[in-house]
Structures are given as C-alpha cells and as structure tokens.
Image (cartoon, rainbow, N blue to C red):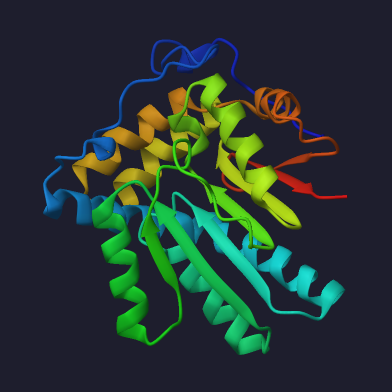
Amino acid sequence: MRATDEAGPTKGYLTGLLPDLVGRVRVPELMDDPDLDRDLHEAALDALTRINKVSGVAGRVWHEARELHAETGAPVRIFDVACGRGDVLMAVAMRAKGAGVPVEVAGCDISPYAVESAQASFDERGVSGAFFVLDALGDPLPKDYDLITCSLFLHHLDESDAIELLRLMAEAARHTLLVQDLRRTRLGYLLALVALHALTRSSIARVDGLRSVRGAFTAKEALDVCRQAGLTGVEISVGWPQRFIAKWRRT
C-alpha cells in the first residue's frame, strides 16, 4: 500500500477551523433515519449521485468489470452492497453497453425507499437490473456474483462491523471485491465542506457529509481492518477525492 494520511492535529491557520481528526468520531447520520421525510431522502440521494459522479466511483467499478471480462470472456455479474439509488450500477451498465461487454447488475440496500428509487430508475430507462432490501450484516449475501462492490458505506460502521462486512463480502465474491470510501484527512474534510455546498442544497447531505469524514477510516486503518477480515493480498490505493480503494481478488 502506498498511502499517506493526514489525520494528525491541524496546523497553522487551519488550527481551530477543523475538528480533531486524529481518531474516528462516529455520529449517527441523518440519512440513516428510517423515518426520514421522503422529499429530504430524495434530495440526499440526488446529492450522493452527484458526489459519486465527480468522485469517479463508477469508473473504477467499470475498470474491474472490463478486466474481469477480458480474462474470462464471460458475462460479469456485479453486486453493489448499500447501493443507494443504484447510480453507480447504472453508469457501469451504460458503459458496458457502449463497449459491448455483457454485464448483469444487482444491488441491495437496507432502505426500502432507496431500493424502490433504484429499481424505478432502471425501469424508466429500460436498463436491466435487480434491487432488493437487505441488511448486509444481518442477512446472507448472494454468492453468485463475480464482482462485489461497495462505496461510501464502510464509514457508517464501527470497526468490528466493518471487519465483519468485509469478511462477508469477500466470502460471497466469486472473483473480486472492490470497496471505495472516504479517507479521514484534513483535506478531505475541506473538500467535503466545499463540494457539499457547491453540488447540492440538501441539508441532509451537507450535515452527513462532514459527519462521514469524521467517522471515516484512514488508508492505514482501512488496510488494518481488511487484514483483520482475512483479505490476504488486499491492495489499498488512494484516489480522487481523498478516497481509499481496497481491491481483493480470490486466488
């Protein structure tokens, strides 16, 4: 792993302007409230769609899917854990269609509204995809998918649950596990502060985005939880914007 984290004390003129990012501080996020107003939930999902797009999340998933198809010559089955509105899978499916690469996509989320929104989006655009409600820590994950991916979810969990989720996803993946999430850094916090005001008017996203950075892992911490989950040979890299990318392949 080649990664440098900046989760130490703030310095210079930033002192006092940023929260203490030395350790994880997990505060419940507003979007996790099952009773959240639907309009507020919809606005927050809109914000996540924009954030995922500028963060290149789908591009990394598509890269892995394309490589896997090149290796096997077979259709690639992709499963997205905590898929939200399914925007990442939609982008991957459209890229695959344009490139003539056969893929099958499906996703799960604990939120019935998110699943409903994802399925409606695919149905409206005539794109094949299956979405269902599932608690990734409490319900069995399907084991017939080649590539299991997950983005912006690990920071919602305490360390023991994060380790368990990684273990379960790796156990279920037939070939590849790809996890993308925030890094807890000063620059990441500042980027979130700026981006959330530039990209969305969602009050939920603006609050949750900053809470997310404070609850995120550093790249070194992410490597540690992956190893504790038994992901031997996992590769951790860092990417735009202040993300860590964990890639593990079954050997």
Image side of residue 51 versus residue 100, left or right: left
Q: Position of residue 172 (x, y in %)?
A: 65, 49
Image side of residue 142 versus residue 38, left or right: right
Residue at (61, 48) in percent of width and height: 240
Residue at (40, 64) in percent of width and height: 131
Question: Quick check: can you spot residue 56?
Answer: no
Q: Is residue 178 above or below residue 97?
A: above
- Residue 167, by quadrant, is top right
Q: Position of residue 122 (x, y in %)?
A: 37, 77
Image side of residue 60 versus residue 30, left or right: right
Quadrant the N terminus occupies: top right
Q: Position of residue 224 (x, y in %)?
A: 72, 23
Q: Is residue 124 above or below residue 37?
A: below
Question: Quick check: can you spot residue 221?
Answer: yes
- Camera-side residue: 119 or 85? 119
Q: Position of residue 106 (x, y in %)?
A: 49, 66
Residue at (74, 47) in percent of width and height: 247
Residue at (41, 15) in percent of width and height: 19
- Residue 127, by quadrant, is bottom left
Image side of residue 195 versus residue 217, left or right: left
Q: Is residue 138 above or below residue 173?
A: above
State the count of labels.
Answer: 0
Q: Is residue 35 above or below residue 106?
A: above
